[in-house]
Amino acid sequence: MGLILVRYVGEIGIKGKNRSFFVRKLRRNLRGALRQGDLSGSVWSEGQRIYVEVADEDGEGALAHLRRVFGVASLSPVSRVPSDMEAIRAEVLAQAGRIGLGPGMSYRVRARRADKSFPYPSPEIGRLLGGAVFEATGARVDLSDEADVTIGVEVRAEGTSIYGQVIPGPGGMPISTQGRAFALLSGGIDSPVAAWLMLRRGCGIIPLHFAQSDTERQKALDNCRILERWSPGWTIKPVILDHREVLGPVVDRLYQIGQERWTCVFCKRTMVAKAAELADRYRIQALVMGDSLGQVASQTLNNMAAITWGTELPILRPLIAYDKNEIMALARRIGTYEVSTRASAGCPFLPERPITSADMERLHEIVAELG
């Protein structure tokens, strides 16, 4: 069987009495990742480590899915041998051979003795095994993080795990440990990235999309499918409303009273109000928006204050300090960039000169006039 060692992020390790809750959620999400790949296997904990076991031929496929599970710091395919020094030495040398370690390369052996009954302490294990690798390969010892190869050895009573590869995970916290939120999801670049960042922090996301056209609707749905790749254990179920039906009456009224410059502010105010109206039905605790400070007219501080004035639902803006290049880089990493940049029609309600610095006193007057 293919055995994979999963290391969870340090934040989980310091949760004290609550740690078991986070680890349990993480194990559940790892099982969800296997199901996403139509893979069968086992997931269990040993001390502060989690192990996943799948059939050997499924190992690479499992890694591809497991490396997208939030809460995972890193993963390593491992070999498990009895906690016997000769068996450990033989497998370490086998790992070095599979890696192709040889002269001109550097390496280190990192040993960790969790089983205190094992006769050698961690430094001695590292020294003995490191010496054996040097004799067998002629490679150069480098105990720093700059070493070309790190061979890890974890000695436990139930067996010793040995690995020669460390695959970074996405970090963050296990999904569904931090409640649930609506994410206002457009067809653009920013909002899917904001949703992804909140998924990464353990929040269960329900996308809320106001569809302007079939094209925009499809872009939002395609991005939802991409986000679901990152959310094993949590199903992405978007809520889609008609843009014109929800926002049209407000826009029409603004034009009637000669305040069309306020359209962008009131469009977003209406979206936020609709999200708050639906919050109890979907057990929503917060609202996620893709605002980046100063990026467009509706994202100045004055306008953001005007948009959310009167809303009791907490507003989360994970992109607030990101610039556009940083957001695009994240979108490419996540996989939403190509979908978000597909051609589509602009907003039909966009005024010629939108308000960029909303005055709160005037806002209150217009709200009263709109009724």
Image: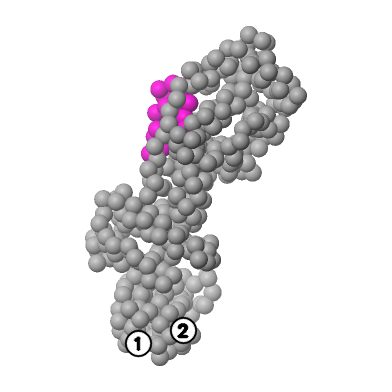
The residue shown at (61%, 36%) is: 312
Residue on which disc 2 sits: 122
Q: Tell me the element at label 1.
A: helix
Residue 36 lies within the magenta run: no
1 and 2 marks in contact (CB < 8 Å): no
Residue 184, horizontal then vertical, whole percent:
51, 33
Q: Is residue 4 left or right of residue 367?
A: left
Q: Is residue 319 left or right of residue 210?
A: right
Q: Name the residue nearer the viewer: 174 or 223.
A: 174
Examine the rendered structure and indicate whether residue 152 appears above or below residue 119. Answer: above
Stretch of the chain drawn in magenta: 208-225
Examine the rendered structure and indicate whether residue 187 appears above or below residue 333. Answer: above
Q: Which mark is residue 85?
A: 1
Residue 230, horizontal then vertical, whole percent:
41, 47
Q: Is residue 163 left or right of residue 251?
A: left
The residue shown at (39%, 46%) is: 234
Examine the rendered structure and indicate whether residue 150 appears above or below residue 40. Answer: below
- The amino acid type, in three-letter code, at marker 1 is Met
- The amino acid type, in three-letter code, at marker 2 is Ser
Magenta span: predominant SS is: helix
- Within 10 angstroms of label 1, few (less than 14), some, or many (20 or more) residues? some
- What is the number of callouts on the image? 2
Q: CA distance from mark 1 to mark 2?
A: 12 Å
Residue 217 lies within the magenta run: yes
